[in-house]
Image (cartoon, rainbow, N blue to C red):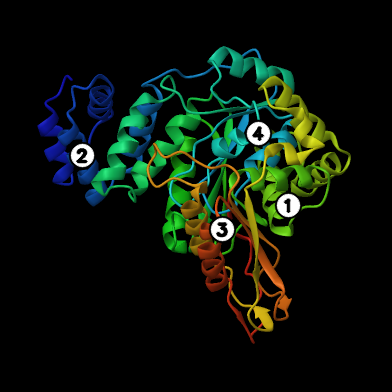
Amino acid sequence: MQHHPARLIAKKRDGGILSREEITDLVSGVVDGSLGDAQLGAFLMAVCCNGMSPPETAALTLAMRDSGRVLQHAHIARPKIDKHSTGGVGDKVSLLLAPLVAAAGVTVPMVSGRGLGHTGGTIDKLAAIPGYRTDLSIERFQHVIEQCGYAMLSPSAEIAPADRRMYATRDISGTVESIPLITSSILAKKLAEGIDGLVMDVKCGRAAFMVQEHDAIALMESLVAVGRAAGIKMAALLTDMDHPLGMALGNSLEVVEVIQALDGPCADDLRDVTLALGVEMLLLAGVAADADAARATLVRLWQDGVVRQVFRHNLELQGGDVRVLDEPSLLGRAPTVVPVEAQRPGFVMDVDPLALGHVVVDLGGGRRQPSDAIDPHVGIVLKKVLGDAVLTGDVLAFVHARTATAAKDAVARVQAAMVVGEERRRRGALIKKRMA
């Protein structure tokens, strides 16, 4: 490092503004190890407590991006647009959205993550498909993009390596919630994909990273501003995470829901969020005149089976067993499947996504620590949603578990999370705010 680390840390601790050169120097120290663990933790805490100015956040983001390989797709003429979600329960949108937007003529180079805690990860869902590989070389990743319009890649040491160490340190140092650090972590990896534009799906609600709407809006504003400062087109939607998205929670169960959706039947909320994000991607790409035209194009491609064809082509290119499209049973099944029954008549007054997400984790379908293994077959499939009328004994959901004991415990917890009462409640707006 060219600057003394302690001096830079103290400057930020005291509320000072770091220059682009100072931030770049700090990030180089993160990568080569010259910034020690204690020093990195102190720097992150100083940022968490004092924040960063927009130019500082942009400088941090670009330095993290440039800490590794930045992909170039100059040989691909089509616009390159990606989408990123801040995470939620039942959020399998990427699996539908990428082939949908690719079918509309937009290239989607998607580097996705694994789940941690109650939020699921796209890479874990794809891992539930026999043979499907996301650990592609950069060259293979680019080949898949060229062939079918999109590719799904798990993070590697080549892409924004500074983020790998900083993310792990944030997790153990109480600095996860910092908006500048969240912004730089998300955008550093996305900017390294070589994209022209990015659509952010910022979740808000009980099972979201940002529970309060004002915090979620602040994150949206930061992401959009920094992305634009870095030279890419940006749009963002604030979407509801006070209810699970779709009906399936758990990796292979969510893949089954996606396969069914490719053929037409799709939960209303999953379809609406997927189409809304797709519209924004087409608008950023400049391939649709307006939102109505973009939506009409996407609906037609979905209904005509073109999206299913693109999904199948991607399966072939990334090693997945294409037979699962016609035989979802090849994904496997948990040994124990038990219904969750309503204990009284009335209406479903709540479907608590956070509680249900924790049930899935405890069944083995999620991680408490990054090193935890995942059981792809366990989870929950909802049969009722908020506002549905039920009679005593009606099935609210099915629990998919490894053992009868685990299933019994999960059933009681799902019943508690899906409250039945006399009041009929309706779900609020799915799309709370748009920023473009």
| Residue that extends furthest to the front in the rendered view of this protein | 404
Q: Is residue 59 visible?
A: no
Q: Is residue 316 visible?
A: yes
Tell me the CA gap for discs 2 and 3. Answer: 43 Å
- Left or right, 138 with reference to 342: left
User: Decide: marks 1, 2 in contact (CB < 8 A)?
Assistant: no
- Where disc 4 sits, the SS reads loop
Label 3 or label 4, whichever comes before in sequence order:
4
Q: Which kind of residue does numbered mark 1 sit on?
A: Arg
User: Decide: marks 2, 3 in contact (CB < 8 A)?
Assistant: no
Label 3 or label 1, whichever comes before in sequence order:
1
Task: Name the residue nearer the viewer: 214 or 367.
Answer: 367
- Where disc 2 sits, the SS reads helix
User: Decide: marks 1, 4 in contact (CB < 8 A)?
Assistant: no
Tell me the CA gap for discs 1 and 2. Answer: 41 Å
Instruction: Provide the residue designation for mark 3.
Output: 404
Instruction: Provide the residue designation for mark 4.
Output: 129
Residue 41 tag number: 2
Residue 271 tag number: 1
Image point (67%, 22%), residue name: 319
Q: Which kind of residue does numbered mark 4 sit on?
A: Ile
Across and down, in percent, residue 269 comes to 69, 58
Q: Residues within 10 Å of mark 2 (few under 14, many from 20)?
A: many
Q: Residues within 10 Å of mark 3 (few under 14, many from 20)?
A: some
Count of numbered circles on the image = 4
